[in-house]
Amino acid sequence: MSHILAIDQGTTSSRAIVFDADLRVRAVAQEEFPQHYPASGWVEHDPSDLWTTTAGTCRAAIEKAQLSPGDIAAIGITNQRETTLVWDRHTGEPVHNAIVWQDRRTADMCRRLRDAGHEPTVSDRTGLLLDPYFSGTKLAWILENVDGARARAEAGDLLFGTVDCYLIWKLTGGRVHATDATNAARTLLYDIRKGRWSSTMCEMLGVPMKMLPEVRDCAADYGETRPDLFGGAIPILGVAGDQQAATVGQACFRPGMVKSTYGTGCFALLNTGETPCVSKNRLLTTIAYQLDGKPTYALEGSIFIAGAVVQWLRDGLQIIRHAAETQPLAERADPGQELILVPAFTGLGAPYWNADCRGAIFGLTRKSGPAEFARAALESVGFQTRDLLEAMRADWNGDAEGGGGGGAGIATLRVDGGMSASDWSMQFLSDILGAPVDRPEVLETTALGAAWLAGMRAGVCPGMEGFAEAWALERTFEPKMDVATRDARYAAWQRAVRATLSV
């Protein structure tokens, strides 16, 4: 039993990766699934797609690795966060499609709650903001809009869960209804300081607490898989939301360390240690990971559109056929043109949190073409990352001045995710930040974090210090842009954002 199976259930695909005891990748299986857009700003998944692609990729990865279930010490799960499911505890049937984290249908609900003065209470209890991004208002919408859902929930017949929780329930044949602290912390229903579901938040959103799962550590016993799924029972021993799993996978265990993951969106987390750091710049206070009953906190900035902007070039504008074409296209862009793309396709995330604004592009000329659009798309990710780090520095420094234990030094920025493989994008990121950017040898940090949590719990992987020592650097990108150019480019971005927000 010297291998770990990591389930990485993402927004557009499900993946299963087999790691050995040295946390080297032995086999990978991946399957995409459809996205559903029933109305403007609405995004849904069919729960059966989440389950069948997860189970199918697990079987395929085990087969590719030429292993049997007896060779696998544990399963670790990482998942798209905030995506919301409700199902019948007796039949397992979902009452509605999964409402995806990107979905904005509850914007009016959030606005009413803000206008009623509830946001300070929300931030105090959960560390979050009143935004459609989080699970709580999505759950409230299902209870209000699905026929009979509220009565069934109050009778104890319906269960709520984020994707990890739903998969655990399915994998264990309905024996375990549990989630981990990092996923619970993203629901708008969990008190991150007291470490329990908040009755105040449940009352505010009209959520019966009997729907909610048990909350456990990131490395804990989540039951065993049904023996018939993979030919034998396998224990589930690690769970973390995708961005927290990437934080773990990047070994960002010291306060001041930052990781930034570039997937569909971009998510930066700053480890702030044992004490929550309250943001004055509309960042999120959240749980980075929880081990042995002790949470480690983080500041998080969330960007809704990162890799998705490349998908837009491919599927919307149809100026590329494959994502890999974006970098060479951007390299051919006319340096005399300075297009600024604000990719607010579903609103803007941190630090703006505006659900209503929409994307815009500035600086168009008759000579603007596919190359300039490609460069502006990639640069938009770097600009948004700087927005996040500027806010993090202000909060972290302010926390130090207030005696909260913060510090001026953001120690390092470690990057991962699909877009981090682009040298051009990472060089621009370093340039616009004016700071080094570290890219690890292993870019599969999300799955790696889940695998380490499960493997550490199973006793086949090293502890935290040994894992951190094994982290390996592939390349450091150093800034090459001069200060005047950097400041001018960032000022142009800020003007573009202000103009977008004012529309």
Image: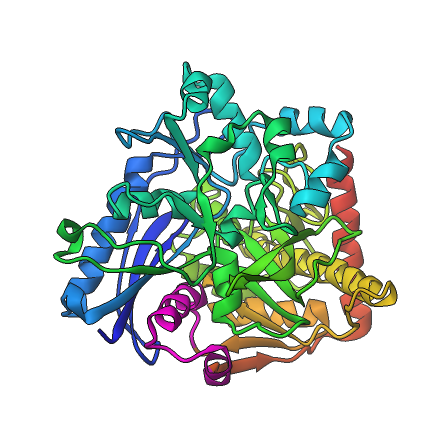
321 lies left or right of 331: left
Main secondary-structure element of the magenta-colored stretch = helix
Residue drawn at (33%, 48%), measured in percent from left and top? Answer: 168
| Residue 464 lies in the magenta-colored region | yes
Q: Residue at x 44, y 48 (%)?
A: 179
User: Can you tell which quarter of the image residue 214 is in?
Assistant: top left
Q: The C terminus is located in which quarter?
A: top right
476 relative to 131, above or below: below
Q: Nearer the viewer, residue 169 or 163?
A: 169
Which of 213 and 419 lies nearest the eye of the viewer?
A: 213
Task: Establish if 270 lies above or below 302.
Answer: below
Looking at the picture, how far across and down is residue 411, in whole percent?
68, 76
**Which percent across, then down, holds residue 364?**
68, 46
Residue 455 appears in the picture as rendered: yes
Residue 11 showing in the rendered view:
no
Residue 42 x, y percent position in the rendering: 50, 30
Question: Does the magenta segment cover residue 104?
Answer: no
| Magenta span of residues | 442-470
Q: Position of residue 104 (x, y in %)?
A: 57, 32
